[in-house]
Image (cartoon, rainbow, N blue to C red):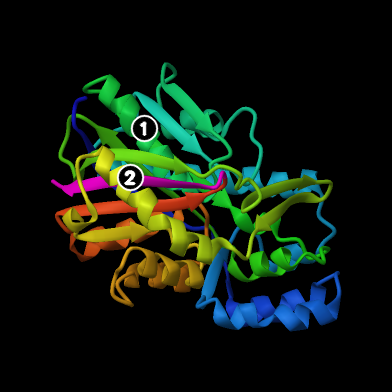
C-alpha cells in the first residue's frame, strides 16, 4: 500500500455553549422523571471534570417537548453549518481548493440525513460534481478514528487522489429530559457537540504519515454502548461496566492492533485517546500502564468541550499537533459494537 499523509486537521464547534453548573440547574428543573433519582445521580455533573460544552441550540430549546422531526431539523441545520465551516478550513489548511478534492468520507451517528450531509453541502463549498462520496452511519464514538482510517484506505488505493474526511456529531439533541433512565442523566452531564475534518493523500506536505489502522470488536457486547430508537428520539445506552471493561480488555486490544502493524506499545511515544469520560480516561491510563496524568490533553478537551462522540479524539490530536507531535502516536477510540478503533501516526 502507498503511504498516506494527513495533510491537515481542523475542528469546529456550534455557536452556543453552556457551563456545567447551568446545565445541572436546568436539567434538575426540567427532568421529567423522578426528581429523587435525579438528585441521587446529580453528582455526575460535579464529578464529570467538564467546565463547559458547546451545543447546537440555545439552552431554552431543550425545555420543549421535542420529537423526532424537531430534533432532526436541528441536527440538519447544525450539520450544514459545521460541515461548511470545518471542511473549508481543512481544505485551506492543506493548501488546496475545494475543486482539488476527489472524495469525501462523512461520518455521523446523531441524526438522519438523506440526501447525506456532504451531498447537501458539497456544491455550496465548491466540491466537484464528480466527487466520490462515502457517508457512514453507526460508528458512534469510534467514528473519528474509523472514519479517518476509511478515508486513508481509499486514498492509498488511488495514489494521488485527495480525500476529505469529515465527522460531525450533535449529541446534545439526544438529551432526554423525559426519561427516568439513569443513563439519560449521565448523557445530560457529558454530551457536547462538535465537528472535525482532515485531508489525506499520498501526495502533499503532511503533518504525519498514517502508518496503519485496526479495529477490535468484542462479542456479546452490543448492550454496552449505543442508541435505542424511541418515539421522542434516540435514547443513549451507557453501561456502568465501561470503565472496568476498558481496564480489563484495552491492553490486549491495543497490543493486537499494534502487533498487526509490526509494532508494540514500547514503540509508542504518545497515546491519543477518545476522552469518553473522566473514569474512562483513568481506566485507559491504568490499562495501558501510563503514568497518572499522561492523558492531559484528553482531560483538557473533556473539560472544555465534553464528550462530542466521534470528533472528540481529533480535538485531542489537534492539541497534540499544536504542542508538537511526537515521533509515533497511537490513536484509540471506543464505540458501539463494543469496539476499539486504532490508528498509528508517524511524524512527517
Q: Secondary structure at mark 2?
A: helix
The answer to which of 330 and 202 lies nearer the viewer is: 330
Q: Which mark is residue 256?
A: 2
Instruction: Tell me the residue at 63%/42% (across/down).
Output: 76
Disc 1: CA contacts within 10 A as few (<14), some (14-19) or many (>=20): many
- The main secondary structure of the magenta stretch is strand
For disc 1, the marked residue is 151
Q: Secondary structure at mark 1?
A: helix
Residue 344 part of the magenta-drawn span: yes
State which tag comes first along the sequence, 1 or 2: 1
Disc 2: CA contacts within 10 A as few (<14), some (14-19) or many (>=20): some
- How far from the left and from the top, in percent, is residue 182? 74, 68
* Residue 310 seen in the current view: no
The answer to which of 1 and 151 lies nearer the viewer is: 1
CA gap, disc 1 and disc 2: 22 Å
- How far from the left and from the top, in percent, is residue 47? 56, 81
- How far from the left and from the top, in percent, is residue 160? 21, 23
Q: Which mark is residue 9?
A: none
Instruction: Tell me the residue at 27%/19% (across/down).
Output: 158
Q: 340 left or right of 25?
A: left
* Residue 107 seen in the current view: yes
Residue 315 part of the magenta-drawn span: no
Foreground mark, 1 or 2?
2
Instruction: Tell me the residue at 83%/63% (across/down).
Output: 178
Quadrant of residue 58 within the rendered picture? bottom right
- How far from the left and from the top, in percent, is residue 173? 68, 55
Query: Which residues lie in the magenta part?
Result: 337-348
Quadrant of residue 152 within the rendered picture? top left
Amino acid at each position: 500500500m502507498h503511504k498516506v499523509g494527513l495533510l491537515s486537521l481542523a475542528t469546529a464547534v456550534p455557536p452556543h455553549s453552556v457551563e456545567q453548573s447551568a446545565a445541572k440547574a436546568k436539567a434538575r428543573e426540567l427532568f421529567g422523571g423522578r426528581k429523587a433519582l435525579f438528585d441521587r445521580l446529580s453528582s455526575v455533573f460535579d464529578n464529570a471534570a467538564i467546565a463547559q460544552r458547546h451545543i447546537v441550540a440555545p439552552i431554552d430549546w431543550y425545555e420543549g417537548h421535542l420529537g423526532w422531526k424537531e430534533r432532526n431539523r436541528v441536527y440538519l441545520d447544525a450539520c450544514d453549518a459545521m460541515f461548511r465551516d470545518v471542511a473549508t478550513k481543512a481544505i485551506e489548511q492543506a493548501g488546496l481548493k475545494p475543486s482539488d478534492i476527489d472524495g469525501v468520507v462523512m461520518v455521523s451517528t446523531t441524526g438522519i440525513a438523506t440526501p447525506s450531509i456532504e451531498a447537501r453541502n458539497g456544491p455550496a463549498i465548491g466540491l466537484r460534481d464528480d466527487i466520490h462520496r462515502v457517508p457512514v452511519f453507526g460508528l458512534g464514538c469510534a467514528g473519528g478514528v474509523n472514519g479517518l482510517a476509511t478515508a486513508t484506505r481509499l486514498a492509498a488505493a488511488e495514489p494521488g487522489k485527495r480525500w476529505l474526511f469529515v465527522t460531525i456529531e450533535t449529541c446534545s439533541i439526544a438529551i432526554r429530559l423525559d426519561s427516568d433512565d439513569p443513563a439519560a442523566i449521565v448523557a445530560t452531564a457529558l454530551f457536547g457537540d462538535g465537528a472535525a475534518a482532515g485531508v489525506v493523500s499520498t501526495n502533499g506536505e503532511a503533518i504525519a504519515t498514517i502508518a496503519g489502522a485496526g479495529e477490535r470488536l468484542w462479542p456479546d457486547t452490543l448492550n454496552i454502548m449505543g442508541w435505542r430508537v424511541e418515539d421522542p428520539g434516540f435514547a443513549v445506552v451507557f453501561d456502568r461496566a465501561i470503565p472496568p471493561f476498558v481496564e480489563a480488555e484495552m491492553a490486549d486490544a491495543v497490543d493486537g492492533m499494534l502487533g498487526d502493524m509490526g509494532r508494540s506499545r514500547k514503540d509508542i511515544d504518545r497515546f491519543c485517546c477518545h476522552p469518553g469520560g473522566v473514569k474512562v480516561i483513568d481506566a485507559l491510563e491504568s490499562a495501558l500502564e501510563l503514568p497518572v496524568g499522561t492523558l492531559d490533553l484528553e482531560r483538557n478537551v473533556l473539560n472544555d468541550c465534553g464528550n462530542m462522540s466521534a470528533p472528540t479524539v481529533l480535538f485531542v490530536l489537534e492539541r497534540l499537533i499544536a504542542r508538537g507531535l511526537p515521533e509515533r502516536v497511537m490513536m484509540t477510540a471506543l464505540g458501539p459494537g463494543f469496539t476499539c478503533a486504532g490508528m498509528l501516526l508517524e511524524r512527517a
